Image (cartoon, coloured by chain):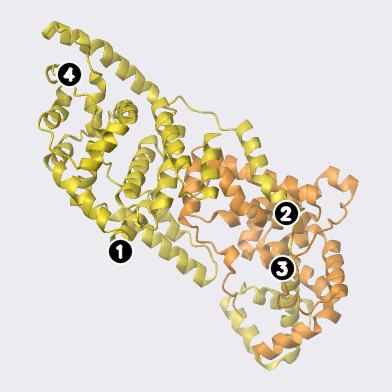
Amino acid sequence: LSGHERERLSAYLDGELGASERDEVAQHLASCAECAAQLAELASVDDAARWLAADAPPGYFDTLPGRVRARLERRAPARRLPAWSWAVAAALLLAVVTPLTRRAAAPQSGPPAAPAAVAPQLQTATPATSEPQPETTRAASNAAPTPAGAADARKDQARKSEAGFAAPPAEADRRKSSADALQRLQPAAPPAPAASSSAPSASGALARADGAPARPERQAADEQDSRARDNEAMREAAAAAAEQKAAAAPEPQAKTALAAPGAAGARIEERVAAASTPLTDDEWRRLVSMRAQTADEWRRLREELRHFAEAWPESPHAAAARLRAVEAGHSAWRASGNPADEAVFRADAQAYLEREDARDADKARVRRLLR
Amino acid sequence: MSAAARPYHLQEVMGPDEAFLLARARRGDASAFEEIVRLYQRRVYGVALRIVRAHDVADDVTQEAFLRAWRSLERFDLGRPFGPWVCRIAANLAVNHVRSPRAREEGLPEAHAETRSREPGPLGALLDAEGARVLEAALAELPQEQRAVLVLRAVEELSYAEIAESLGISAGTVMSRLYRARERLALALRPYLGKAAERRKAGAS
């Protein structure tokens, strides 16, 4: 055998010959025992190379991730001016201007109750439309020349995540989650009565507060407990609203949400009853295929995950949802730099660490986030 | 003989957990990247050690590969598999590390005394202690460029185009280096590989 022929055999072994050359070699191999033996020998060499496992000294892999991370933080990418600086400016402006206008319109003795925080709730409660991100669609076309099995599997995954994006939650679902989020964010203290005259966008929230429908006991109790966190959430909502100020006004959707909050509460109970069903699996698949980049997207993901874990505590995915909710909260904070996001994240992380049913490895992950 | 299905550790479909971690890491979340390192460290270190053959150097290369990946995450397409990408970075660093003037001055470092996991694979069952030593020596004697190509093909199962890209050489060069590496190893191992080859032949026909 010439060197050239042996080189061809080597490439044939790797499936790297053109179609005609490949057929030629295959035909030849069928009738030439010597070449077949050569090919087997080359394949054995690869086996040998694979077989020589590369092991590190004991304990090496326990410390490597931490050492890499320590070096990362030294050269962390420069942080841009946080987006929430605009939100703070807007909130401050409102906080100063609103009491003034209010005093001018109707002087009153009581302190104004954070008027800036009322309107943005509506925006937070309105889920952003889940838009397909270019990344996922690229995934399919990215299938490199790899074995057919891997490529197929990848395409399959791409298809799945595309489906996750292409099919936004059904209208009913969307309304439900809007309403749920609204209930979650309902302020513990009722807004000041004068707010309606000074802040037109707050009228929706006021209408809801006035004719607040009866909510399920469980949820009402939760809100009592997490009053402090709701306040955090409201501050966060103020920031979110300011970030979104260029986005389309969510007024109509917010109204729809207001129309059926009681029904949404009832639906939560149904969902709790129906833990671990194909429905929860579908919902879980949708959640894990969601990709987030901006602080808003991370916040939304955090809320959806938290909601999932609360609505389906018996689901096999509930534990993962709780962990991911904490992680998404961390990312929201990282993305916004907003202290309100930090507070939510820290509260969630703390609550997570106190859970007895959480796995130690997962708790370690959360602790690393807190570092 | 087409390429067989990839072994589990090489499967390129990213789990949802990894995609999630990568998305967070891309936002600058170091703790998410730490988890990524945890997931891929063995594979990356494996590529590095097989090429440079000394733990200290492999450690350097592994850390540097992850740091570069971190810095390039902005440009990384989340739809692509992360493993092959970071392994290619590591292979490139490993080859250039060995080539660097300092490394040449000091000569090739002593082979690291690894504790091998000797789970008998199809070949492991056939190679005795003597054969393993011969294999080790033959691998160590290969020029590092040939070894890098062999590792990326045999262990990481990258295509010629992917190997060419990561090492900055042409696909033709990949083909010839790979062939020469296999030839040299085959020559050294022939006495030990006879049985394996016979078994393969019997299985193939």
* Local SS, label 1: helix
Q: Which residue is label 3 attached to?
A: A50
Residue A36 seen: no
Q: Identify the residue at image location x=80%, y=73%.
A: B183
Mark toward the viewer: 1 or 3: 1
N-terminal of the pair, mark 1 or mark 3, is 3
Q: Do labels 4 and 2 touch, CB within 8 Å?
A: no
Q: Are marks 3 and 4 on the same chain?
A: yes
Mark toward the viewer: 3 or 4: 4
Q: Identify the residue at image location x=14%, y=43%.
A: A262
Residue B1 seen: yes
Q: Report in which chain the residue with disc 1 lies.
A: A
User: Three-letter amino acid code at disc 4?
Assistant: Ala
C-alpha distance separating marks 4 and 2 = 65 Å
Q: Residues within 10 Å of mark 1 (few under 14, many from 20)?
A: few
Q: Judge whether A236 appears above or below B42 on screen.
A: above
Q: Judge whether B118 appears above or below A40 on screen.
A: above
Q: Do labels 3 and 4 touch, CB within 8 Å?
A: no
Name the quadrant containing residue B1.
bottom right
Q: Which mark is residue A278?
A: 1
Q: Judge whether A264 appears above or below B13 on screen.
A: above
Q: Which residue is label 4 attached to?
A: A192
N-terminal of the pair, mark 3 or mark 4, is 3
Q: Colour of chain A?
A: yellow
